[in-house]
Each structure stands twice: as C-alpha cells, then as structure tokens.
Image (cartoon, grey):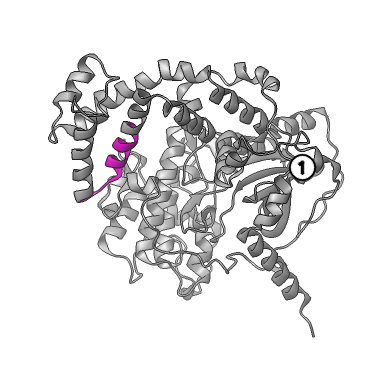
Amino acid sequence: MCDMSALDNLVANTAYLKAQGGDEKELRKRRQSLALPKPEKCETIRASVGQDFESLCELQPIGKKLFRQHLNETPEYAVAAEFLDELNDWELAEGAAKDKACTNIINQFCKEGSKSFLSCLTGEALEKCKAVTEKDFEVVMTGKVKEAVREFLKGKPFTEYTLSPLFDKFLQWKEYEKQPITEKYFYEFRTLGKGGFGEVCAVQVRNTGQMYACKKLCKKRLKKKQGEKMALLEKKILEKVNSPFIVSLAYAYETKSHLCLVMTLMNGGDLKYHIYNIGEKGIEMDRIVYYTAQITTGMLHLHAMDIVYRDMKPENVLLDSQGQCRLSDLGLAIELPAGKTTTQKAGTGAYMAPEILTDTPYRTSVDWWSLGVSIYEMVAGYTPFKGPDGKKEKVDKDEIKRRIINEEPVFEHKNFDPLTTDIILQFLKKKVDERLGCKGDDPRKHEWFKSINFPRLEAGLIPPPWLPKPNVVYAKDTGDIAEFSDVKGIEFNDKDEKLFKEFSTGAVSIPWQKEMIDTGLFDELNDPHRKESSAGLDQEKKSGTCTLL
C-alpha cells in the first residue's frame, strides 16, 4: 500500500532541494522584461535618501559598490580606499601574514616617494603616517591615520559622488527597491515548521532565484490572541538589526489572510534538532564553542541596541547551508531604552532566569542566563534544572521554577570539562551583578573562547566545524507538521487595517541590495549593452497565477 504522506514529503523535499540548485536558463527568461526605472523618475527619492555617508557608502551594499567605482576614477581617492581595505585585511590577519601585511602597508602608503603614498593626509595625521614604525603601527594606523582617511573620503570625494552619474544609478536602484511586494513576487515551497501564529515555509524570489524562509502570521489568529502589536514589534526590530549572527529580514508584506516576514533561509536545522535527532544526544565540544561564539556576538549586537532577546534556547538558533548559526524568532524581544527595566514574564520555562520568575526588574541579564542553560543542554542533551530523561523523572513547571530560584546545577555528564563547567556556572549566577556579561564585562574574553579569533569569526573567515549535507532536509517531515485550524468569528476594523499597512513595507534595504548583487541582477541591469525593456514588472502583473511547488 502506498504511503501518501511519505510520497507528499518526498515530492516537497525534491522540489525544495532542486530550487536551491537554481535554473539559470529559466532565470534568464524571467529577467528579460526587467529594467531599472528611468533617471527622470528618481528625482523625488534624491531628497529622501539623505546625506549620511555611513549609510550611503558603507552600509548599503549597492551604495558601497557604486561609491567605490567613483573613487577608482581618481587616483588619490582610489589610494585612500585601497589603504582602508589593506588595513582591514591586516586587522583580520594572523601570525606571519599579519607581520607581512604591516610591512607592506608602511612601504606602500607611508613612504613619501611611493606611488600609493597617502597624499590626502594633512597636519598631525600626515606626520604620524610618515614616521610610523612596526612598533607603533597599530596605535597610529588604526587611530589617527584611519580616522583622517575616512574624514577625507567623507569630504570632497563624497560630495562629487552625490553629483555624479553613479549616484544617479544608485537612485535608480533605490527607486527599484521601492517596488510593491506581494505573494506573486515569490514561488512557495514546502513548510519548514510552525510557530504560535502560523507556519514557516521556503520561498524563492522569482526574478533572482534567491531562497528565503517566509514566516506567515495569520491575521485572524494574531487578532484573536492579541498578538498584532507583538508581530509589528518583531518586524521593526528585525529591520534594525544587521549582524551575520541574527536572521536578516529581507521583505515584509501582507496577503489577504497573512502578514509575511521573509527572512534568511537557514536550511541546516536548529540546534535542538542537532542535540536530539542526530547521533548521540548532545553536540561535539568544538561545535558548541563555535556556535556559542556566534550566539554571544549576535546577542551583544542586540544588547548594544538596547534590545533584550528573551527567548535564547537551542530551538531558536538555526544553521545555514554553510554551517554558520544565527539567532531567530525575535517575537519576544523587547526594546528597553538605557536605564529602563521590565518585570514582564516572557520566555520558555526551563530557560527563564530567576529574576523573571521572581518578578525582579531586569534587562539583558536574562539572555546570559538562558545562554548558560543552552550551553549545558548542548553538552548534556538535557537542561540543568530538569535533569536527564534517563531518570524517568517527571518534573512539573513549579518544580523547575523552584530549582532555578534555589538550586545549583549538577554537572554529571562525562563531557563537562573544567572550562565548560566554569563558563556555565558564570552564566548561571543567581545574583545578576555576579553573572558573566552583567558586570560591564565581555563574555567573549572568557578562557573557554581562547580558540576563537572574534574579528575573523565576524568576517566569516573561520571555517565551521560541521557542514550540513546539501541533499538532506533538516526539518520535520511535512506530514508531521500539524496544520492550523481555521479561526472563525474575527472581523477587522480600521485600526487593524492601519497596523497591517504599517507592517507591509516591502523590501529592506541592506538584505535586498545584497540579494541583487549576489544573484547577478545588479550587474545584469547595469550592463550598458543590455537591451532594456520598458515592460519592467508589468509582465509579471499580467499573470494572475502563483506557482505552488
């Protein structure tokens, strides 16, 4: 007898994996009708993009790329940009390579007779640059000299750029970025999981081939559970963050029935899946250190923006196809302006800090506690205040709460070494002012992380200790993901519609521009020899169909 559920899962997985491989021929066909808006249609946006150098020339990928093209047209400007690149490479280098890079920078940029001498410098910065030695290199070059070169680029080069045809091209892309986003912009694939308000499915952008995860929040369910404001807050927080260790929001749009967040596709599974479903319970120590280093850096990024995560647990840490991890599900995150605290209960029982359970005002301390619990679980295959399943001990919520408040964790598992035990104990201090990460300290300086070069980790230069297999779907079978029941008796009013509109803002600049560059569409639409069509997206609008795979 044919198992239809297994067959459905096989078909869904096959289509999903095939989409990730891409179809260049089909993609070229879809792109034929695409064109950037004409320059004369982009004047309105000129005023709205502002004059912020960091945003326009460093953070936005297309802006950065076009500004660099502008600098390359003038030798003095090109040298300044090249120096910043070389200095960045030096900062990320190690050992002999770092020493060699230091010597090369001094010879190339600091000797007056050199072709690449930093002639843009003046005053004290110029004198310090000419006199620099390998001994004082770091202090001089990463301080006064680097600052002076950036200030130079923010002056005349930047002003000239904003008046150049390359900036006009940037404005065309900014106008294109504003195109309306609907469900017809994507192909939809298999369901990857579900949350409290809806499912998460894999989607693919029709015109670029880029794969994402789409979190579909049911409007009626949101209203019934009073979750509308929480959904809007999650969207606004995701828009703000820009870290390689937190999922990126690329698009936010609405359909008739759902609010949709389109985010980084993390197809290597979550850490809970890896703890409990692959081999022996738990994860290898080198992986735990690597993932925790990335998690810690991601949480510090949130905390620097006065955002408390409040839902740190292995289930919310996802791996991508390259074995890198990111924090996900910011639905419980909260913004707390400097000095402000909250006593709101939020999180998952076994990972909640004592201060949440005792109604004590808190800020970011609760995230470091949850990280300690998560490291323990990655090592042992169970949480510290619940204990191993092997004891067949039924522990209710009240007992877990009592243990969290009153008891210390026990380290019985064979894989707990002294340094791992110490960092967990430091994170699980009951008193907040004694807890690691809460004393004005940086948890990344703990000896447990001694094998991690954090600047190189952030630059993506440290190979991950484990890689997902490209032919495996690290998610539950489609048949095992329960479907939501229909929500009845919910009607929307003007207030609801206003919130839906506020949510549905389309593309998010930095991830969208990165997608345009990574998928080759940036180069294709900028090609002066490409035969443009004025049809733009009109061709897509003529079709009322949306393919579901």
Q: Could you tell whether 367 is left or right of 236 in the image?
A: left
x and y, in percent, of residue 9 in the image: 71, 70
Q: Could you tell whether 438 is left or right of 145 in the image?
A: right
x and y, in percent, of residue 434 in the image: 31, 42
Give the residue pinned by disc 1: 219
Does 136 sit above or below residue 191? above
Q: Could you tell whether 308 is left or right of 77 in the image?
A: right
Residue at the image position 30 percent from the left and 21 percent from the top = 148
Task: Identify the residue at the far front of this view.
Answer: 529
Residue at the image position 35 percent from the left and 42 percent from the top = 437
Does dot 1 land on a helix, a strand or a loop?
Answer: helix
Name the main secondary structure of what is drawn in magenta: helix
Image quarter hosting the N terminus? bottom right
Residue 368 in sight from this viewpoint:
yes
Does 395 sit above or below residue 529? below
Q: Could you tell whether 516 is left or right of 114 in the image?
A: right
Circle 1 Cα neighbour tier, 10 Å, few/some/many (<14 / 14–19 / ≥20): many
Q: Does the magenta stretch include residue 492?
A: no
x and y, in percent, of residue 518 in the image: 55, 46
**Magenta span covers which residues?**
84-95
* Number of numbered tags placed on the structure image: 1
Q: Which of 336 and 480 is in front in this view?
A: 480
Residue at the image position 43 percent from the left and 68 percent from the top = 282
Q: In the image, what residue type sits under mark 1?
A: Lys
Image quarter hosting the C terminus? bottom right
Does 498 sit above or below residue 313? above
